[in-house]
Amino acid sequence: MADPAVMAGGFSAVRSGGGKATSSPAENYQLARRRTLQVVVSSLLTECGFESAEKAAVESLTEMIQSYISEVGRCAKAYCEHTARITPTLSDTVVTLIEMGFNVNTLPVYAKRSQRMVITAPPVTNAPVIPKALIAGQKRTHPSHIPSHFPEFPDPHTYIKTPTFREPVSDYQVVREKAASQRRDVERALTRFMAKTGETQSLFKDDITAFPLIAARPSSIPYLSALLPSELELQTLEETDSSEQDDQTDSENTFLSDDPGADKENSMLPPGGVVPSVKASEENMIDNPYLRPVKKPKVRRKK
Amino acid sequence: MNRKKDKGFESPRPFKLTHQVVCINNINFQRKSVIGFVELTIFPTVVNLNRIKLNSKQCRIYRVRVNDLEAPFIYNDPTLEVCHHESKQRNLNYFSSAYTAAVSAVDPDAGHGELVIKVPSELWKQGDEMNVLKVYIEFSLDQPKGGLHFVVPDVEGSMAERGAHVFSFGYQNSTRFWFPCVDSYSELCTWKLEFTVDASMVAVSCGDLVETVYTHDMRKKTFHYVLPIPTAASNISLSVGPFEILVDPYMHEVTHFCLPQLLPLLKHSMSYLHEIFEFYEEILTCRYPYSCFKTVFVDEAYVQVSSYASMSIFSTNLLHSAMIIDQTPLTRQCLAQALAQQFFGCFISRMSWADEWVLKGISGYIYGLYLKKTFGVNQYRHWIKEELDKMVEYELKMGGLPVGSNGHLTCPTPHLHFSIKHPHTLSWKYYKMFQCKAHLVMRLIENRISMEFMLQVFNKLLSLASTASSQKYQSHMWSQMLVSTHSFLKSISNVSGKDIGPLIKQWVDQSAVVKFFGSFAFNRKRNVLELEIRQDYTSSGTQKYVGPIKVTVQELDGSFNHTLQIEENSLKHDIPCHSKSRRNKKKKIPLMNGEEVDMDLSAMDADSPLLWIRIDPDMSILRKVEFEQADFMWQYQLRYERDVVAQEESILALEKFPTPASRLALTDILEQDQCFYKVRQGACFCLAKIANSMMSTWTGPPAMKSLFTRMFCCKSCPNIVKTNTFISFQSYFLQKTMPVAMAQLRDIQNLCPKDVLNFILDLIKYNDNRKNKFSDNYYRAELIDALTNSLTPAISISNEVRTVDNLNGDVRLILEEITRSLNMEKLLPSYRNTITVSCLRAIRMLQKNGHIPSDPSLFKSYAEYGHFVDVRVAALEAVVDYTRVDRSSVELQWLLNMVQNDPAHYIRHKILSMLGKNPPFTKAAESPLCNEALVDQLWKLMNSGTSHDWRLRCDAVNLYYTLFGLTRPSCLPLPELGLVLNLKEKKAVLNPTIKPEQGPDTTEMTGITMGGLITMETVSSVSMSSGVAPPPQGLKRKLDSVVGPLGSSSPEPGQVLQEEDTSKKFKIRVRISSAEDEIDMESPHDSQAFIHHHLNILERPSTPGKEPPAVDQAVLSLPVTPLPSSFGKESTSSSKHSGDHHHHHHHHEHKKKKKKKHKHKHKHKHESKDKERDSHAFSNSPASGRSVRSPSMSD
């Protein structure tokens, strides 16, 4: 991947003189095909009685025929894939041609016309080599229920984990070292960023950028941030909890069975006072004056 | 007071309160105001009850009605301004006595009060039978400075969304700040409480919530509470806010309240309250006395815990999540304290201040039992030792701390700068030590009569009280709910049959502690231990102990207790030893607890069988013991004695023996898992000290480093600490402490060893809490503390400015860590911002050691209102320290300004107490800060600026004492010069600048005398202050300068004015005579003031809670010399105009007329008269024209 870029940058100018033909096999292959098409166009023109043609006209016609053929190919492939095959059949092509408004019945006649010219076969050029995919293991064979004409399994490394044979950095010290320095770098970068973008306070008078401190900003409800665990902490708590849950569930079943009850009671506290029907009977037993509904004022009717 | 020794309780009032209604109709959070009324049902106990005295502070009273008849009243509060208008008195003795007099003048325990209501004459003679009187008082509070605290966060939204709340607070009996009542712990009555609040709010108060009713517009709710158990007004409280409600899952009659969003924390923090309940109910064999219990967690709390009848108010900062380790025990302890006070303090109240120690003692004692049960015997004994040491230290420093009964009244305390006769005049520190001593004394009683009897006594008190509480008022049983020293002692002797009189006499009535010095010699021939116990009973705060003392001797054959008698002249005690000395006999050695252990006996003296000796091991005397024994004995004691107190004592002693053997003993303790963690923590610090003393001979890595590595670092890579788990709390505490102790190590250059610093930096770097279910915030904070500890003074080239470039490399690393941690706190704040707190301390330390420029601005920004309270306190501490080190008057002013203006009461209190602890200067030293202006400012602060908060005023007094001492501050001009001026004064020019003040002044002269007590106080204070009374030189200067220009424009402005003024007085006088039959107040002073107050009504409708504006103006108007306000009066009275004989005479006559009591004194020389006048000024202060200005219902 890196090579063409380097070439484009560094050497292409130097080589441009003699290097065009030899640029790449794929390019050669296409040029050869194009040339054949030009020959075809020319012969057809001759067939029609033209003696000469402008190069531009030939070029345009070549372009048209190429588009036509490409479209036929593309369409045929689409039909074939639509029926879950990978190689187009004759009928695919026929349908395509019909679709494109071509009368297929005229084709055999046209092919057997007398004045047709025979064109020499295009020069043999090597078909471009598809770079070989990395084979990193034994390809799986089809299981019995899959017909053999179906495509082969891709290379195993593309769908299962690739076994690596060199041990990753398992040295505990290195891992810890890395984690620590990574965290420190992130923290430092983050705090520096915050310090740069916001107000700061400084410990030194001569160089106020030396150890920037994010300015202290009073908050209107300071106890909230100071008392409530941060989201990050909650997250870790959940993680550690879930990992420990397995151990606990067995031993502390009794405890856990108590707890939901407690939670239920609290959940009904919010002002609505709508008791979830599930445990209504149990909860009704809690007679706490703060849970009772607020009374309506007595309306005094004067008679 | 009126308490009879062996009878029941006798009320000091001529009436008995039976029921009180408090109704608060409106609470306005925007304006911070409250409107409501109270109705007191009283039974007169005398035939002609014509006056009713109630307590009320800062309330504006609109009308008073007695049985539906309008009643005239006087409202005056002498504590608003303690010393009126005086300029010369700046000594604390004078202030203290004046303050005590003022407080006593309205003391409900003596039957006094700020609000005097005259019972309409129609109701006087309603026959002989006692008729019920209903006293109805309408009042309001506007921006109360004390009593009620409004917290209104400045954010968008409705008050409920903003989390605005209000709660009552106060130190001791402070209910008078928010509604008129009899603010005494001994006046019990039943209650009906009604609070109408916004529909989104909850009002939590004492008693049972009977119902909640919407108002007609459905916008508000009224909470109706009924408290059928007779309760003192001082135990009534209120909190209103948009609280989240949590019904305790274990006890449905218990309800918890917290501010919005904190419910998860509340759930966790309250999850063990039921255990505390169960514990107390079990040991007291008594149900919780109230039918419900409420806990409310509020912001900006005055104290962490305050208990009221059936509810407690806590600081919201006690709430914590399950991730927090360190706060958990602290919160539980606070809950336990609150609950203990519910039984003793709220349900059972006290007869008088002298009996307070019983309540504090019992609640502290049962709290101790809870500690023992929940946190273990080690924790309990550690706590007792800690409390004992604290208390002993305080007593030795202050010279005595009598806690109870007779002590209050008889024990002279001239060494104290405050009076202990009244709770409101006490220093806060004293009050804390008082509580400490109270529970220690209870423990001594327990030692004497056994715990079983002790609990029986408590049960008896409780059951008597609960029987009484269910009775009707008429049965006169309610006084059974009051405890007194006498009744407590009687119960004890009834239950146990023991007389603990001497014990009480020694520890309660008498102040001071015992100081023992012990040493010993072993007499091999007689196989006897010769123990010498000496006492120091001559230095202040000590007393002589005579009686038994327990000595425990650990010998090779076992541990033996001996009880020795300490007698008058016997110092030496011979104790026979049980075992012969023998070496190398392999035999296990039995310990006190029956355990038998192997010991390496090679260290001990071959001739002696003694391993260690302990004097008074059970702490059954309030004492300090200094005992001498050999280092190896201390080491044995540390290793093998199982009592944590002994272990801690030996750790302390080993500091003096820096030897390899001590090192080994300490290291062994550190490694021992079974050892109590606090002992191990102590061992860390001791080891650091020993290592520093042994610097030259120390071998191996720095102390504790390898130990820490072994315990807490990875096996494979010893420089990296394990990821945190904190599963074992013992190890957690050790892990936290060791780095802090290690950082105290020093090398030969007196620097922290490079090894250690890098080690700590690595701990911070590799700290990994991702897999931990606990928060590591306290651990990280302690690591920052460790960095702080490692700092040493910078090598400074003289007066060099600290810059970034010349920063030392190590310090740069430290500073980087601190900067990063502090910045991270902004993004991910830690619980209670512990890390910010540590960082601020570290930065101050860097400044102090000269590594970075000393600058208070950072701390000042963190100290602003709106930061978390712990952060503010840490920042303020740094500013206080800066003020002292840099002698900065700007910062001192800034701090004092905050003391006056900060919304949070706790912060104000904290600033003053920190200033007291770390004073900018002391009375002993000279300082540029010590100047007249500061003296005046502080004087004003304690005189009038802190009248809304007893605690704060006492803090100010404390600070004044620390800075200037008891006598006149040295920075003021010499009193002798003032005296000269004083002599001249009578002939001196009348100062014309006092014009606006004359009216009130003259009235003040003729003020109310509040009963006999205050007069007594006055006399004593006169004698005290006479020597130093006269005005300072500054006054003279000022007078001259003022008189100069003014005098030239109008020659005798003062004279004219004086005449006007006197004519006014005559008018008043006339009114009095005409009014006297209508308003029958005993003394003419009273009626004078009363009328004056009537005259003043229209001019001054303001509430008395505010600073009198006139004074302020006077201060401001004074040019140049900062001597404030009060000089006006003196100069008026003793007019300086040499020729102004007329005025003078007039003045004289006036006095004669009005002050018959003091008539005889007028025969004295002028000089003495002037002094006398000064004393009047303050003695009469209660009636000053200024104070008497509540709006009244004269029509």
Image (tube, coloured by chain):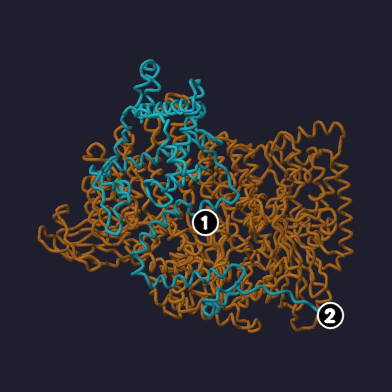
Chain colours: A cyan, B orange
Which quarter of the figure is the N terminus of chain B placed in?
Answer: bottom right
Spot occupied by residue B1004 in the image (x, y as percentages of width and height): 77, 53
| Mark 2 touches mark 1? (CB < 8 Å) | no
Q: Is residue B1127 left or right of residue B928?
A: right
Spot occupied by residue B53 in the image (x, y as percentages of width and height): 72, 68
Q: Is residue B744 visible?
A: no
Q: Nearer the viewer, mark 2 or mark 1?
A: 2
Position above or below: A182 against B953: above
Spot occupied by residue A111 in the image (x, y as percentages of width and height): 42, 37
| Dot 1: chain letter | B
Residue B71 appears in which quarter of the rendering?
bottom right
Q: Is residue B319 visible?
A: yes
Task: Give the label on residue B317, or none.
Answer: 1
- Between the C-alphas of marks 2 and 1, the distance is 52 Å
> Looking at the picture, which amino acid does disc 2 mark?
Lys
| Dot 2: chain letter | A
Q: Is residue B653 left or right of residue B15?
A: left
Spot occupied by residue B495 in the image (x, y as percentages of width and height): 44, 80
Which residue is most to the left? B585
Nearer to me, B865 or B695: B865
Which residue corresponds to mark 2?
Answer: A302
Q: Do the residues marked 2 and 1 share a common chain?
A: no
Nearer to me, B474 or B1054: B474
